[in-house]
Image (cartoon, coloured by chain):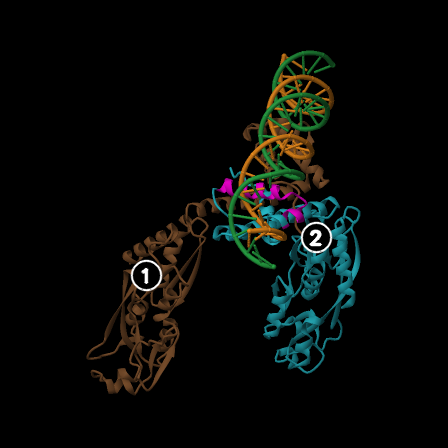
Chain colours: A brown, B cyan, C green, D orange
Amino acid sequence: MMNPRVSLDQWRTLQAVIDYGGYAQAAKQLHRSQSSVSYAVNKLQMQLSLKLLHIQGRKAVLTEAGKVLLQRSRQLISEAYAIEQQAHHLQQGWEAEIRLAVEASYPTQLVMDALRQFEPLGKQTRIRLEEVVLSGAEELLLNGDTDLAISPFIPQGFFGDELLQVHFIAVAHADHALHQLERNLTTHDLNRETHVIISDSGSKGMDAGWISDARRWTVSSPESAHKIISNGLGFGWLPEKEIEQELDNQTLKILPLNEGRHETAILYLVYADPDQAGPATRQLAAILKQVSAEN
Amino acid sequence: MMNPRVSLDQWRTLQAVIDYGGYAQAAKQLHRSQSSVSYAVNKLQMQLSLKLLHIQGRKAVLTEAGKVLLQRSRQLISEAYAIEQQAHHLQQGWEAEIRLAVEASYPTQLVMDALRQFEPLGKQTRIRLEEVVLSGAEELLLNGDTDLAISPFIPQGFFGDELLQVHFIAVAHADHALHQLERNLTTHDLNRETHVIISDSGSKGMDAGWISDARRWTVSSPESAHKIISNGLGFGWLPEKEIEQELDNQTLKILPLNEGRHETAILYLVYADPDQAGPATRQLAAILKQVSAEN
DNA sequence: TAAGATATATCTAAAATTTAGATATGTAAA
DNA sequence: TTTACATATCTAAATTTTAGATATATCTTA
């Protein structure tokens, strides 16, 4: 097995000799005697059977081998230190990992903004991000497979805060048949065309839209739905924010429905367990609320 | 400054407890007493103010924090060990880095084959690969900026071995004007067409081909030349190996020249200094000769 | 070129850390 | 309940590391 014989302290001492410009200076900085520093470095060189420093005049200078190994040892030391930092964060209750489930209609940009803000505060906390659709978040919450979820509803027995309202608009490509009728559309009109709907990533199979549609395409992400509709292959409800530009330049047009032209989905931030949530989870939750509110 | 307080030995001991299934077993494997192992792990937990193990029944089991930190500490230990390995290789004279300059007309596949063979023998030796053209290798050799070079000639005062002969063939795309004449070509014919030549990556500016060409495109790599010629935008001499397929399927055709239809470039493996070359450099040189000979 | 200042090397005893061995305590299996 | 197994703790011994004193070497400067 791997059994390092050189101690971190020895590497650290070597670094100090170089960084502070000599054995004596290193000794002072490390609050140790010069002979102690000398001992540590000599032992290191002895163990490696390799000279890392040579005395040039009366100054210690790195050999070629010394340069190479010093550089690697710096990484080693900082990794060792980072582990201890993480231990400290864990000791204070910081989680090593947060599992976050995000409903796909929640704007990706906001997730990214939140993670960027969280990162420096996150103290070594990894984020495991899962994108889910509709009841997908609920399923993860019920199974205890996520710590936080952004979901369009709050499952029974859970707590959550409103994060964001997403406005869905019924649209089709400007060239789509539904836009050629030039009158308000009826259910009958819609039933003759391909309806693009987003399927559920959970296993419960709750579908949005009219389940009764004869002709429909089911896709697993809003991006796919968007792409299909933008290509004129069907109609459907898409998040307002995502299609602003296409509405502006008239590639997509709002369907002239009598009702249901707009649908609003409210996205909630749901905790797996608000009491057991650690400080990192709370921190991330706060940031998510903030970026959502700013939006 | 970063000053780890936990020693490698402590992390190593924690690992042993887990890997060998208990304090007693770890002690046996580490040739230490059970109380010594107990002491090391306790000190570790004390220093981190964090429980890493808890006793379940009469067995030591990792806590959640313990799992996270153990995993990271494994990396730490193996990095520490790797540094010592590299020290050993350096001690034996293995170079930390080999700088290799390769003439672009040397087949990339052979470089890759050689590096793949070298890697396990290379003992932590990094390779710095530079692709050069014509006098580029010479310049690096003269400036001491490379250890090994694959070059089309051996600069004054250097030593080298023949590696490979590269056959260049004068070609143009089948649809190219030069192929429509259906007779042997004259210098005059060539001068009316675009000649694609490879420029020099050195600063001396030795160009291959006829410097006198009125119409010529100068490119900095054989790949670019190949691409241009394959697109019918000019003619030029390309390495036989690289265009075998295109000659077979007749996209490229050999120019019916009276002379100079073929040109042979000999590539040499040149040492910056054969006496000072370390074992890794010699090893790599041997592999390069071998893969070149097999070709 | 000699003296003083600066820097590393080495020696020894003291201090600190780590280890082993003995024993205590607690759990699981027979 | 007894036995076997596993970790915890205590103390003294062994080992490692440290400090302080001093030696040796180099650079600076007069």
Prevailing SS of the magenta stretch: helix
Marks 1 and 2 belong to one chain: no
Percent of width and height locating residue B240? 71, 72
Percent of width and height locating residue A163? 28, 60
Q: Compared with residue C15, is residue B102 higher up or lower down, i.e. above or below?
A: below
Mark 2 burial class by Cα count in 10 Å: few <14, some 14-19, many 20+? some
Q: What residue sits right under mark 2 in the picture?
A: B123
Percent of width and height locating residue A274? 33, 56
Among the 4 quarters of the image, the one containing residue A10 = top right
For residue B78, the mark is: none
Q: What element carries label 2?
A: loop
Q: Compared with residue A186, is residue A164 higher up or lower down, i.e. above or below?
A: above
For this view, does C15 lie left or right of residue A261? right
Identify which residue, B264 or A257, lies in the foreground: A257
Mark 1 burial class by Cα count in 10 Å: few <14, some 14-19, many 20+? many
Identify which residue, A27 or B22, lies in the foreground: B22
Q: What element carries label 1?
A: strand
In which chain is the residue bearing label 1?
A
In which chain is the residue bearing label 2?
B
Pointer 1 with pointer 2, Cβ within 8 A: no
Percent of width and height locating residue A63? 68, 38
Given the image, on which type of amino acid does mark 2 rest? Lys
Q: Is residue B40 magenta?
A: yes
For residue A270, the mark is: 1
